[in-house]
Image (tube, helix red, strand yellow):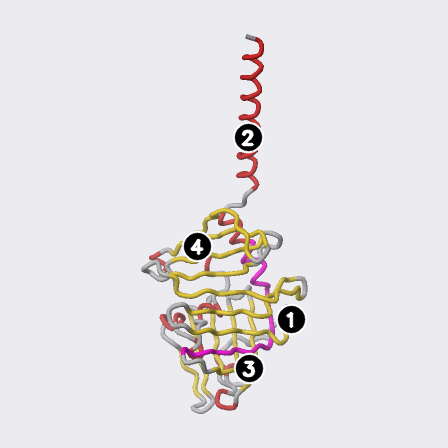
Amino acid sequence: MRNTTNHRRLVFCVSLMFFTGVILLRAQSPTGQEILDRVNAIQNPANSSGVMTQTIQTSSGQFRTFELESYSANKGEKSLMRYRRPASVKDQAFLMLNNADDIWTYFPRTKRVRKLASHAKKQKVQGGDFTYEDMGSGDAWKEEYVPSNLGEIDLLDERCWKLQMEGIPEKDPAYQKMIIMVRQKDYYPLQVDYFADEGDLMKSLYLEDIREVDGFPTAMRMVMRNHEDGTETWMEILSITYDWNPPAGFFSERNLKK
């Protein structure tokens, strides 16, 4: 009888330890919102200034490469990009405000600034696989998506959180859903999968060659692979700093012409 009682106590203790461990593990796991807040904080420093290349591979296998200056402020809420090369697009520029809700473009041939329609943020930049919103949305994800933590996963020998971002229809999000692989050690995303309204995987963004710049981890190479069109576009950072303050009036229509 004593052995039976001791056995029951042992089983109870083991079960209690197991469930306590599960509860503690769940308590230690961040919520989807907490992960998103950390991602936004680390990916959207106050200001930035840099030079990068944009290479587009078409479905026929041809390549087009551009070089451009890129500036952002107010944690990505404002951004301005100006092309430097090749000569055919030199000085062409676009300004995005309010997380790419408002976009202006400047074409040096006509010397005119034109404001794009609100839906233009979903258009491709230079015919590549990055849209205006992909490049200038800042932390708009907070307003347009509902985040949830789907658990842990290993990717590229890194332990990651699998963050699901479900689009809010009334906010007119660019994508129906996104899945973001966020490495746990610094909350920097390694991969973003974008899904269409039908639930099909449209494209994937791969963040590579991550280095620390001015205290912020930074992907020096970003590859957007379009699964529907069979195309790719990659952005490679040549130089970047987060220790930059924009002059007064920098993010304005007038400055697009300079």
- The residue pinned by badge 3 equals 67
The residue that appears at 50% across and 77% down in the rendered structure is 252
Q: Nearer the viewer, mark 2 or mark 1?
A: 2
- The residue pinned by badge 2 equals 18
- Earlier residue among tags 2 and 1: 2
The residue that appears at 62% across and 76% down in the rendered structure is 238
User: Between 200 and 247, which is closer to the camera in this rendering?
Assistant: 200
Q: Amino acid at mark 4?
A: Met
Counting from the top left corner in percent of width and height, residue 126 is at 44, 80
| The residue positioned farthest toward the left in the image shown | 198
Could you tell me how far apart the alpha carbons at marks 2 and 3 are, in whole angstroms?
A: 56 Å
- Earlier residue among tags 4 and 1: 4
Quadrant position of residue 174: bottom left
- The residue pinned by badge 1 equals 241
Whether 21 is drawn above or below 221: the answer is above
- The residue pinned by badge 4 equals 165
The residue that appears at 42% across and 52% down in the rendered structure is 146
Counting from the top left corner in percent of width and height, residue 163 is at 48, 52
Could you tell me how far apart the alpha carbons at marks 4 and 1 are, in whole angstroms?
A: 29 Å
Q: Amino acid at mark 1?
A: Thr
Q: Amino acid at mark 3?
A: Glu
Q: Nearer the viewer, mark 1 or mark 3?
A: 3
Could you tell me how far apart the alpha carbons at marks 4 and 2 are, in whole angstroms?
A: 31 Å
Q: Nearer the viewer, mark 4 or mark 2?
A: 2
Whether 107 is drawn above or below 144: the answer is below
Mark 2 element type:
helix
Mark 4 element type:
strand
Q: Amino acid at mark 2?
A: Phe
Q: Contact, CB < 8 Å: mark 4 with mark 1?
A: no
- What range is drawn magenta here? 38-59
Could you tell me how far apart the alpha carbons at marks 2 and 1 are, in whole angstroms?
A: 48 Å
